[in-house]
């Protein structure tokens, strides 16, 4: 099949067995949740479009605390808004997968410019000592498999796992799996 990175992320969410996706639309991450919205209910999953990024993160944390495996998908500005919630999940040892499809510019600056500038925010951005695992995907195939790995790590160690993608991978089309 030929897919883009966001579709591969959504397929990875399905393959991992996650069953809750909480999000708020933000470019270039939105198409991953759109794909999930089209197919998730058929396999027992649910996409919750919250009123904002903070509520999306809180919804995912609550779902995970209640025993459902949850993911929240966003982009850089939304990831910034989720910091307090992510800190709560770290402190409470609630498993949570956060996807950050990075883009250039703060706020509504340059939502289609490719940038990978959120690494330090993903590693260190939170209040106080908030350790988490950060996975950075390198290609479209990685978008798929990283979601499976992220769920396993999050639930095995009761922690937050952040998966970093970017605008280029989100929209690029590539055969999956790659020919050997």
Image (cartoon, rainbow, N blue to C red):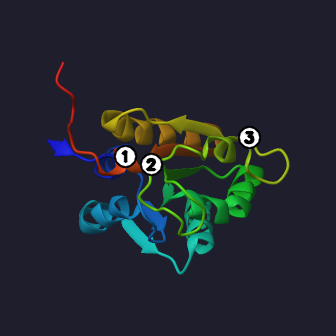
From the image, which quarter does the C terminus lie in?
top left
Q: Earlier in the sequence, mark 2 or mark 1?
A: 2
Between 146 and 96, the one nearer to me in the picture: 146
Q: Residue furthest top?
A: 180
Residue 161, percent across and down? 58, 44
Q: Earlier in the sequence, mark 1 or mark 3?
A: 3
Q: Is residue 18 visible in the rendered structure shown here?
A: yes
Question: Distance from label 1 to label 3 (Cα)?
Answer: 28 Å
Disc number for residue 114: 2
Give the left or right position of residue 43, taking residue 114 as reference: left
The residue under label 1 is 168
Residue sitting at 21 percent across and 28 percent down? Answer: 178
From the image, which quarter does the N terminus lie in?
top left
Residue sitting at 59 percent across and 38 percent down? Answer: 134
Task: Please tell me how crowded label 3 is: few (under 14), some (14-19), or many (20+) other residues with Cα within 10 Å.
Answer: some
Residue 16, percent across and down? 38, 44
Q: Secondary structure at mark 1?
A: helix
The residue under label 3 is 131
Callout 1–callout 3 Cβ contact below 8 Å: no
């Amino acid at each position: 099949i030929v897919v883009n990175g966001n579709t591969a992320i959504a397929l990875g969410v399905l393959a991992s067995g996650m069953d809750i996706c909480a999000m708020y639309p933000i470019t270039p991450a939105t198409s991953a949740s759109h794909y999930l919205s089209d197919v998730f209910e058929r396999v027992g999953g649910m996409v919750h479009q919250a009123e904002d990024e903070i509520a999306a993160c809180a919804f995912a944390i609550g779902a995970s605390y209640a025993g459902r495996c949850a993911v929240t998908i966003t982009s850089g500005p939304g990831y910034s808004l989720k910091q307090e919630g992510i800190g709560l999940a770290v402190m409470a040892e609630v498993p949570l997968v956060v996807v950050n499809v990075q883009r250039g510019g703060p706020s509504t600056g340059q939502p289609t410019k490719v940038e990978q500038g959120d690494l330090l925010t993903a590693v260190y951005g939170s209040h106080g000592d908030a350790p988490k695992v950060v996975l950075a995907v390198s290609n479209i195939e990685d978008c798929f498999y990283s979601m499976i790995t992220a769920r396993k790590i999050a639930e095995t160690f009761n922690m937050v796992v952040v998966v970093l993608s970017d605008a280029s991978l989100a929209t690029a089309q590539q055969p999956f799996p790659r020919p050997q």
